[in-house]
Image (spheres, grey):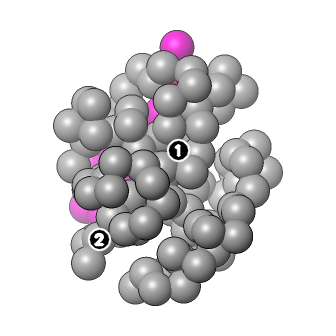
Amino acid sequence: MPKIHFIEHNGKEHVIDAEAGKTVMQAATENLVPGIIGDCGGACSCATCHCYVDPAWADKVDARNETEEIMLDGVMNTESNSRLSCQITVKAELDGLVVRMPASQF
């Protein structure tokens, strides 16, 4: 199973085993990682799973789609590496992926 490194805004790290085929958001919520809420359950309609993909991994995750771009337009504190974790599918190539959480999802 690929390992994902979730880093809270305060620097606390959570390393979890993520099942390939699930989303990064699902991996976070199933493992009770603080900072990823996922209110919409992964439907890309709430943006409460906003995260920052470490720049070293930016080219390894799938590109944003149009719906994700629209949702991110309404998110506070976005950066060029902002993503909705419900839109990143876990795959073997993402073993070691590093994502950081914002200070708040609201």
Q: Residue at x 64, y 26 (%)?
A: 91
Q: Is residue 95 visible?
A: no
Badge 1: residue crowd in 10 Å (few <14, some 14–19, many ≥20): many
The C terminus lies in quadrant: bottom left
Amino acid type of the residue that numbered disc 1 sits on in the rendered structure: Val
Measuring from the top left, give residue 54's x and y in whole percent: 59, 55
Q: Residue at x 48, y 20 (%)?
A: 19
Q: Residue furthest right?
A: 59
Q: CA distance from mark 2 to mark 1?
A: 18 Å
**Eyeballing the image, is 1 above or below 3?**
above
Q: Quadrant of residue 51?
A: bottom left
Q: Residue at x 51, y 75 (%)?
A: 71
10 is within the stretch colored magenta:
yes
Q: Is residue 106 visible?
A: yes
- SS type, badge 1: strand
| For discs 2 and 1, the disc positioned in front in the rendered view | 2
**Eyeballing the image, is 95 above or below 24?**
above
Kindly identify which residue carries mark 2. Answer: 105
Measuring from the top left, give residue 72's x and y in whole percent: 53, 76
**Eyeballing the image, is 83 above or below 88?**
below
Measuring from the top left, give residue 61's x and y in whole percent: 70, 46
| Front position in the image: 44 or 84 | 44
Q: Residue at x 70, y 62 (%)?
A: 65
Instruction: Give, as a single range, the part of the protein colored magenta.
Output: 1-13
Amino acid type of the residue that numbered disc 2 sits on in the rendered structure: Gln
Count of numbered circles in the view: 2
Contact, mark 2 vs mark 1 (Cβ under 8 Å): no
Kindly identify which residue carries mark 1. Answer: 98
Q: Residue furthest top?
A: 1
Q: Label for residue 45?
A: none
**Eyeballing the image, is 50 above or below 97?**
below
Left or right of 94 on screen, residue 103: left
